[in-house]
């Protein structure tokens, strides 16, 4: 339910409808208050503690705003943010174990969609220098992954499902996420907009067929493509 409400907030943001955004933010806030109330009833924590924790975290992770540190660019701010988070993870791990802590830079990513997780992973890696030097290198990698997928499909032969095909499709999607990140585009937002665009164009095809008194079974791919191109021009 929390995830559903969060996506409805994002949808309202995409449409630009501020009244709808206000309503959806209220629904999301209700989920926060509701979960905090359940935790209070079981004796875990209070809503005030939730607020105090996020305030303390923001102050701790933004010493250039609330402290005496200086940051000359947004890139430096993100670098400091990651350093502080890494120190926090090390502190937590050392308190839970007697062994020396050596947290991974990629540790601590919250559960989320695979698309968002891929973006987060590559962002974290890029911040420590593990990244392509320019977008042309990513395009080369994209072509490489496409070739590997084609090869896997050729090797599949009669088998209905080849684990390697699934792996290569995943690799291809991962590179696409890197292209979006390199262009400073949120891949989740970009894909949501493309989904909506597909819906609009497909519904144009449906409406056109209804007006002609036909359905998909009575149309060939050439007509459907013509209607698709017609929808694109609108």
Image (cartoon, grey):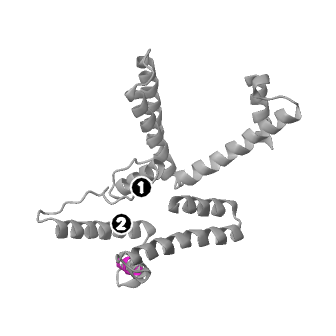
Seen in the picture, residue 135 relative to 227 is either above or below; the reply is: below
> Which image quarter holds the C terminus?
top right
Residue 219 in view (yes/no): no
The answer to whether 212 appears left or right of 71 in the picture is right
Residue in the foreground of this view, choosing between 152 and 47: 47
Q: Residue at x 63, y 59 (%)?
A: 11
Circle 1 sits in a helix, a strand or a loop, which is it? Answer: helix
Q: Which residues are magenta?
A: 55-60
Q: Position of residue 216 (x, y in %)?
A: 76, 28
Judging depth in this view, the residue of 142 and 7 nearest the camera is 7
The correct choice, above or below, for 8 with respect to 52 in the image is above
On residue 120, the disc is 1
Q: Nearer the viewer, residue 31 or 219?
A: 31
Coordinates of residue 203 in the picture (x, y in percent):
76, 41
Q: Nearer the viewer, residue 194 or 160?
A: 160
Q: Secondary structure of the magenta portion, mostly?
A: helix
Q: x and y percent of residue 32 in the render?
A: 49, 72
Q: Nearer the viewer, mark 1 or mark 2?
A: 1
Q: Position of residue 127 (x, y in %)?
A: 36, 58
Residue furthest right in the image: 212
Going from the N terminus, do you reach mark 1 or mark 2 first? 2
């Amino acid at each position: 339910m929390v995830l559903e409400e969060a996506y409805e907030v994002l949808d309202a943001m995409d449409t630009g409808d501020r009244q709808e955004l206000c309503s959806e933010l209220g629904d999301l806030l209700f989920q926060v208050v509701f979960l905090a109330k359940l935790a209070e009833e079981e004796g875990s924590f209070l809503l005030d503690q939730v607020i105090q924790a996020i305030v303390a975290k923001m102050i701790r992770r933004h010493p250039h705003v609330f402290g005496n540190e200086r940051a000359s660019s947004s890139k430096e701010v993100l670098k400091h943010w990651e350093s502080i988070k890494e120190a926090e993870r090390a502190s937590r791990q050392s308190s839970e174990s007697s062994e020396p802590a050596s947290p991974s830079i990629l540790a601590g990513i919250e559960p989320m969609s695979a698309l968002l997780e891929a973006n987060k992973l590559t962002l974290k890696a890029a911040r420590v220098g593990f990244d392509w030097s320019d977008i042309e290198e990513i395009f080369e990698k994209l072509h490489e992954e496409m070739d590997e997928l084609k090869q896997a499909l050729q090797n599949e032969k009669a088998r209905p499902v080849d684990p390697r095909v699934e792996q290569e499709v995943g690799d291809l999607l991962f590179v696409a996420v890197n292209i979006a990140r390199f262009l400073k585009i949120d891949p989740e937002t970009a894909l949501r907009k493309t989904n909506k665009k597909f819906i609009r164009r497909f519904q144009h095809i449906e409406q056109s067929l209804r007006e002609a008194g036909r359905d998909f079974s009575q149309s060939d791919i050439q007509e459907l493509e013509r209607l698709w191109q017609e929808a694109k021009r609108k």
